[in-house]
């Protein structure tokens, strides 16, 4: 079997060569090729049975005539789902659940930091300015008196909900199919048509839903209008879930208290983006998934799936290409 590993999205989303070597050592009977450059991909993809990638172009998908399975090293698989892949019988799997604990901890850290304005304290520290007057004006309800809304109750959202409940928050959730059993710690589940009802109750909102046509810009002017002025919004999912213009207006006009953002429409965020200058925003550069070792568990999952693929067992984390996750 010919396996092509091509995860090379600088500066940090680069599969280490040591992990490619580990794949080779674990699969001595297979041909494992490392493709770093576009030229490498063009040469290797046409004869590949299996791809380990995070993105595909239509041209690459058309050329990969022998391809049977794609394993992504990310959770979001939108960059892979070009029409040629969606329409084909090619199976697509992701690493759902592998990095959920790290991402959930990051989400809760942003919730707490933005609520307590810790980023403003850090800013004042840089200028040796005692920010007591600024910080004491924040009206922050106790966690036990706060409601956390988690939008998206998959692996990541379920972890966020459990952490929030563990801190004493009332946790509610929103998912595409509200009738599914609620994850641990979630007291009420809403459907997409109840988004405004759920937002109106929330003191903190965490976006943990996949990016699909149905979730694109799901938080915009109308949604900010129903949120509490004391609420904070945290996004550890995908940038396109939020209407950026509406977000800036809501933050400038005090329609919400603040935002913690780890995902953006454009990355790196351009220097001229207004989000840089807003004092009620805490940003991290799409690093929520990083912990002790990002790559080892992803490759472990892939190797497990390779054995399943060879023996005809169901693969782990097969995605619904039509739904986009």
Image (cartoon, rainbow, N blue to C red):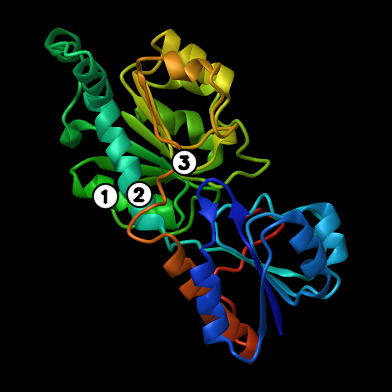
Name the quadrant containing residue 137: top left
Q: Which image quadrant: the N terminus? A: bottom right
Residue under numbered circle 2? 104
Pick the front one: 244 or 220? 244
Q: How many marks?
A: 3
| Residues at marks 1 and 2 touching, judged by CB atoms closer than 8 Å | yes
Closer to the N terminus: mark 1 or mark 2?
A: 2
Q: Residue at x 56, y 24 (%)?
A: 270
Please tell me whether residue 88 is drawn above or below residue 21 in the rendered image.
Answer: above
Instruction: State the CA–CA distance, disc 3 to disc 2.
Output: 13 Å
Mark 2: secondary structure: helix
Please give the residue where the numbered disc 3 appears in the rendered image: 286
Of marks 1 and 3, which one's residue comes earlier in the chain? 1
Label 1 neighbourhood size at 10 Å, few (<14), some (14-19), many (20+)? many
Residue 150 vs residue 310, the one in the foreground: 310
> Residue 95: where, in percent of width, then height?
51, 63
Q: Which residue is mark 1?
A: 163
Local secondary structure at mark 1: helix
Pointer 2: residues within 10 angstroms few (<14), some, or many (20+)?
A: many
Q: Are marks 3 and 2 in contact (CB under 8 Å)?
A: no
Residue depicted at x 50% and y 78%? 22
Percent across and percent down for residue 229 are: 35, 16
Residue 36 occupies quadrant: bottom right
The residue that appears at 35% across and 18% down in the rendered structure is 280
Q: Is residue 157 visible?
A: yes
**Residue at image coords 42%, 59%:** 294
């Amino acid at each position: 079997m010919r396996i092509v590993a091509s995860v090379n999205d600088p500066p940090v989303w680069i599969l280490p060569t040591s992990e490619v070597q580990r794949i080779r050592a674990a699969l001595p009977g297979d041909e494992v090729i490392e493709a770093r450059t576009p030229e490498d991909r063009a040469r290797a993809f046409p004869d590949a049975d299996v791809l380990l990638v995070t993105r595909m172009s239509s041209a690459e998908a058309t050329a990969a005539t022998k391809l049977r399975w794609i394993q992504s090293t990310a959770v979001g698989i939108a960059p892979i789902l070009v029409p040629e892949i969606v329409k084909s019988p090619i199976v697509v799997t992701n690493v759902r659940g592998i990095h959920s604990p790290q991402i959930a901890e990051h989400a809760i850290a942003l919730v707490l930091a933005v609520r307590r304005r810790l980023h403003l304290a850090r800013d004042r520290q840089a200028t040796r300015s005692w920010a007591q007057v600024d910080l004491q004006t924040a009206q922050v309800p106790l966690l036990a008196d706060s409601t956390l809304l988690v939008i998206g109750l998959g692996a990541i959202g379920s972890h966020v909900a459990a952490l929030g409940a563990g801190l004493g928050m009332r946790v509610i959730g929103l998912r595409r199919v509200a009738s599914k059993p609620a994850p641990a710690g979630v007291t009420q589940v809403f459907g997409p048509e109840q988004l405004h009802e759920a937002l109106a109750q929330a003191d903190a909102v965490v976006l943990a839903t996949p990016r699909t046509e149905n979730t694109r810009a799901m938080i915009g002017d109308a949604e900010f209008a129903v949120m509490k002025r004391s609420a904070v919004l945290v996004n550890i999912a995908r940038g396109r879930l939020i209407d950026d213009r509406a977000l800036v207006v809501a933050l400038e006009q005090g329609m919400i208290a603040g935002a913690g953002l780890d995902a953006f429409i454009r990355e790196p965020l351009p220097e001229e983006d207004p989000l840089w200058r807003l004092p009620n925003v805490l940003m991290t550069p799409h690093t929520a998934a990083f912990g002790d070792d990002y790559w080892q568990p992803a490759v472990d999952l892939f190797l497990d799936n390779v054995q399943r693929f060879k023996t005809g067992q169901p693969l782990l984390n097969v995605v619904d290409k039509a739904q986009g996750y």
